[in-house]
Amino acid sequence: MFDVVVLGVDPGTAAVGLAAVQSRAAQFTVRWTATIRTPSAVPPAERAGRLYRATRDAIEAHRPAAVAIERLLWGRNIESAMGVAQASGAILVAAAEAELPVQEYAPLEVKMAVTGVGNAPKDQVRRALIRILGTTGVPEDPDAADAVAVAICHVQQARLRHAVREAAP
């Protein structure tokens, strides 16, 4: 039932984490990860284009059933938030072009799904990923590791949504 590949995305301004994670029989396998870096000296339209192409290529190569992206939370730094919103937009266009469903998750949801604690620090998330995947499955790059966590969150949430639908009268 949940033998799927999900493309997890951790959007950012200078770096975007991407991860193709396969779920099979309640086991997760990281098939591929990457961190796409876009230097600040590159014009915004070109940065968005690079992210779009990288996402499109990942979708073509790994054929995910869905895209899961960490939702942007607006903080005090509006300029940074705008950059993340632009990155997210480029990723959403690539997913829409491939006709893939997209689900967004707040950072708290991702941390809760992986660690059981919504305000877990990054090192706790990493330790939880090691427990879930084993030592060889967790990428060294923190953006790619966050993308893995987003994909795992999506699969767990999809399982819960399915269970609720099945239990409904």
Image (spheres, rainbow, N blue to C red):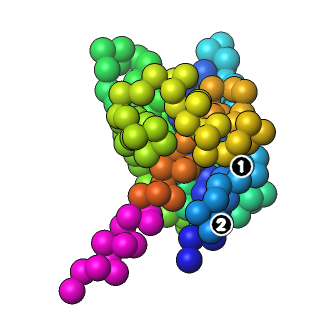
- Where are the magenta residues, as a range? 158-169
- Which comes before the other along the chain, label 2 or label 1? 2
Identify the residue shown where x is 69% and y is 26%: 141
Which amino acid type corresponds to the residue marked 1 in the rendered image? Val
Separation of residues labelled 2 and 1 (CA atoms): 11 Å
Residue 87 pos. (x, y %): 53, 35
* Residue 77, magenta (yes or no): no
Which amino acid type corresponds to the residue marked 2 in the rendered image? Arg
* Image quarter hosting the N terminus: bottom right
Q: In this view, does 103 lie to the left or right of 5?
A: left
Residue 111 pos. (x, y %): 43, 37
What residue sits right under mark 1 in the picture?
A: 30
Q: Does residue 80 lie above or below 157 as drawn?
A: above
Identify the residue shown where x is 70% and y is 42%: 134
Q: In this view, does 55 lie to the left or right of 121?
A: right
State if disc 1 and disc 2 touch (CB < 8 Å): no
Residue 164 pos. (x, y %): 31, 72
What residue sits right under mark 2 in the picture?
A: 24
Q: Nearer the viewer, residue 150 or 103?
A: 150
Q: Quadrant of residue 149?
A: top right
Q: Nearer the viewer, residue 34 or 127?
A: 127
Picture disc at residue 41:
none
Q: Nearer the viewer, residue 95 or 116?
A: 116
* Image quarter hosting the C terminus: bottom left
Q: In this view, does 165 lie to the left or right of 86?
A: left
